[in-house]
């Protein structure tokens, strides 16, 4: 477990200002978002109380941090399989994984794309909650532990977790990854 950094009162106020700029999700969105993907298929959502609408001020900056949780490069994909316990046999990747690092660099993009789709399917079939969210279009927001997805032109931030400090574990990280330094601005009252 990582040690939570002690933050100054100024930085805490600045991070709170960032998250206060996000809006709560209107209650009637629950039914709309749950049926958004397809009439017969529900959209996987993180816990409802952990969803926030991103304001226009921060949207572009947050969008720059979005990462598809399933890597697009062969080395990242192999590491991903190891991290999630996806066996090479399950995705017909035994021969690829046996190749040297330099040989892996020369693999055709179509082969990597096919393997990536198979890995995503295997991950989703495992029942992992994060896989269900990724399969429904949720992206990681850098290394903040937050996830994001656009629905009807609005960017949503979510947290797939409970029982710990979101402020310390996610919001401070988001503030830092966005490169904000509001807490250092002289003469500003926070």
Image: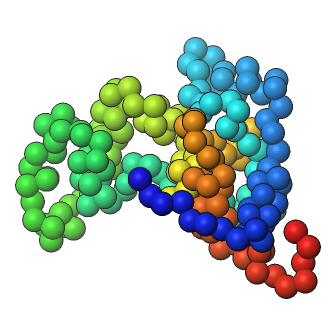
Q: Residue furthest top?
A: 40
Q: Quadrant of residue 179?
A: bottom right
Residue 12, above or below 40: below
Q: In which quadrant will I find the C terminus? A: bottom right
Residue 136, above or below 14: above
Residue 169 x, y percent position in the rendering: 57, 53
The answer to whether residue 135 is visible is no
Residue at image x 63%, y 17%? 39
Residue 78 x, y percent position in the rendering: 24, 53
- 93 vs 14, nearest the viewer: 14
- What is the basis of the colouring in this image? rainbow
User: In the figure, is residue 103 to the left or right of 154?
Assistant: left
User: In the figure, is residue 46 to the left or right of 74?
Assistant: right
Residue 164, above or below 65: above
Q: How many marks?
A: 0
Residue at image x 91%, y 73%? 189
Residue 23 x, y percent position in the rendering: 82, 45
- 158 vs 104, nearest the viewer: 158
Q: Quadrant of residue 65?
A: bottom right
Residue 74 x, y percent position in the rendering: 27, 58
The answer to whether residue 181 is visible is yes
Residue at image x 62%, y 30%? 47
């Amino acid at each position: 477990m990582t040690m939570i950094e002690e933050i100054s009162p100024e930085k805490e106020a600045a991070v709170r200002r960032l998250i206060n700029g996000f809006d709560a999700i209107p209650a009637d969105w629950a039914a709309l978002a749950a049926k958004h993907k397809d009439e017969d298929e529900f959209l996987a959502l993180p816990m409802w109380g952990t969803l926030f609408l991103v304001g226009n001020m921060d949207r572009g900056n947050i969008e720059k941090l979005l990462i598809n949780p399933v890597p697009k490069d062969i080395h990242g994909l192999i590491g991903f399989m190891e991290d999630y316990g996806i066996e090479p046999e399950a995705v017909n990747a035994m021969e690829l994984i046996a190749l040297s690092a330099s040989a892996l660099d020369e693999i055709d993009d179509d082969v990597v794309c096919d393997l990536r789709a198979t890995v995503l399917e295997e991950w989703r079939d495992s029942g992992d909650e994060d896989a269900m969210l990724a399969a429904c279009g949720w992206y990681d927001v850098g290394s903040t532990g937050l996830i994001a997805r656009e629905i009807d032109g609005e960017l949503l931030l979510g947290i797939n977790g409970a029982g710990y400090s979101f402020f310390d574990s996610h919001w401070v990280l988001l503030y830092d990854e966005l490169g904000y330094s509001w807490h250092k601005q002289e003469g500003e009252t926070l």
